[in-house]
Image (cartoon, grey):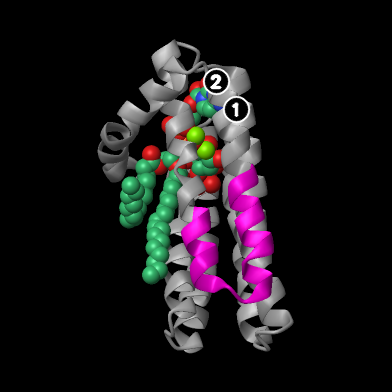
Amino acid sequence: MLNRYARGFFTALFTPLARLLLKWGVTPDAVTITGTIGVAAGALVFYPLGQLFWGTVFITLFVFSDVVDGIMARMKGHGGLWGNFLDSTLDRIADGALFTGVAIWFFTGGENPAIAIAALACLVLGMLVSYARAKAESLGFTANVGLAERAERLVSVLVVTGLTGLGLPEGVLLAVLVVLAAASLVTVYQRVRAVRRQSLAAKPAS
Ligand SMILES: CCCCCCCC/C=C\CCCCCCCC(=O)OC[C@H](COP(=O)(O)OP(=O)(O)OC[C@H]1O[C@@H](n2ccc(N)nc2=O)[C@H](O)[C@@H]1O)OC(=O)CCCCCCC/C=C\CCCCCCCC
Ligand SMILES: O=P([O-])([O-])O[C@@H]1[C@@H](O)[C@H](O)[C@@H](O)[C@H](O)[C@@H]1O
Ligand SMILES: [Mg+2]
Ligand SMILES: [Mg+2]
């Protein structure tokens, strides 16, 4: 939903930056790779140290590279298969690092294994959500539906983790992660159902 409604706004916001980077000779792939390294480093360095607020600030500085790379690619007229593959594959690294960082902290110094387990559930189910779309698209179907697409997953985990670092009770983080895990599971179901419908419609009448 966010992807559909907020994309126009963020594209307009980041177009000047994308234009500047292209002028400096930076490539979309370099932005994709740098952004992923930034998100993963922020999540795997700050979060395991219990720096939930500053980790979130650091990650937020890099996470929008995922919007900027696409704008740059389209400006160059280069939006193609390689870029699509690189972008989606590195997104999985960023997503994995984000929830792993939260889990590491709450399994160790944060001493709240329920939050750590909820973060791991979000990690696994979020990967399943993305896999369902990727597999569907590889078979010629579309599965761009669902309650908890990537933008929703990122916004919810980043906002609530950052606020927890500022003193929000940990129970809220736990509740948001549990709801996110449930919404991810529903999204997997929605995508499976969408592909099932398309596959039935594609069958020749017998
Ligand atoms: C100045 C900063 C403002 C900060 C505002 C913060 C408020 C945030 C509030 C709401 C945030 C809502 C964010 C929603 C964004 C959704 C818009 C969007 O576009 O989403 C999709 C993007 C990009 O997805 P994708 O990568 O698939 O698309 P691309 O456009 O890149 O296109 C892909 C194609 O491009 C080609 N290509 C790509 C790369 C390449 N190397 N070569 C190529 O050729 C190829 O054809 C590809 O197929 O993605 C996201 O999902 C990113 C979402 C980011 C969401 C960040 C959320 C952060 C939110 C809040 C953090 C706040 C923390 C506050 C702390 C609080 C503590 C007090
Ligand atoms: O499928 P999902 O995770 O909800 O959402 C995302 C897609 O919107 C995006 O096009 C792709 O580049 C991402 O890697 C991610 O897969
Ligand atoms: Mg991108
Ligand atoms: Mg992406």
Q: Quadrant of residue 107?
A: bottom right
Q: Residue furthest top?
A: 77
Front position in the image: 43 or 160: 43
197 left or right of 95 in image:
left
Crowding around mark 1 (Cα neighbors within 10 Å: few <14, some 14 to 19, many 20+) is: few
The percent coordinates of residue 12 (x first, y second) are 26, 32
113 left or right of 12 in image:
right
The percent coordinates of residue 139 (x first, y second) are 62, 28
**Picture residue at 50% right of the left edge, 86% below the top:** 170
Q: Quadrant of residue 108?
A: bottom right
In the image, what residue type sits under mark 2? Answer: Thr
Examine the rendered structure and indicate whether residue 192 appears above or below residue 83.
below
Front position in the image: 47 or 169: 47
SS under mark 1: helix
> To which residue does mark 1 refer?
30
The percent coordinates of residue 157 (x first, y second) are 49, 65
**Picture residue at 34% right of the left edge, 34% below the top:** 14
Q: Where are the magenta residues, as a range?
A: 37-59
153 left or right of 130 in image:
left
Q: In the picture, which quadrant includes the C terminus?
A: top right
Measure how far apart labels 1 and 2 are at the Cα level.
5 Å
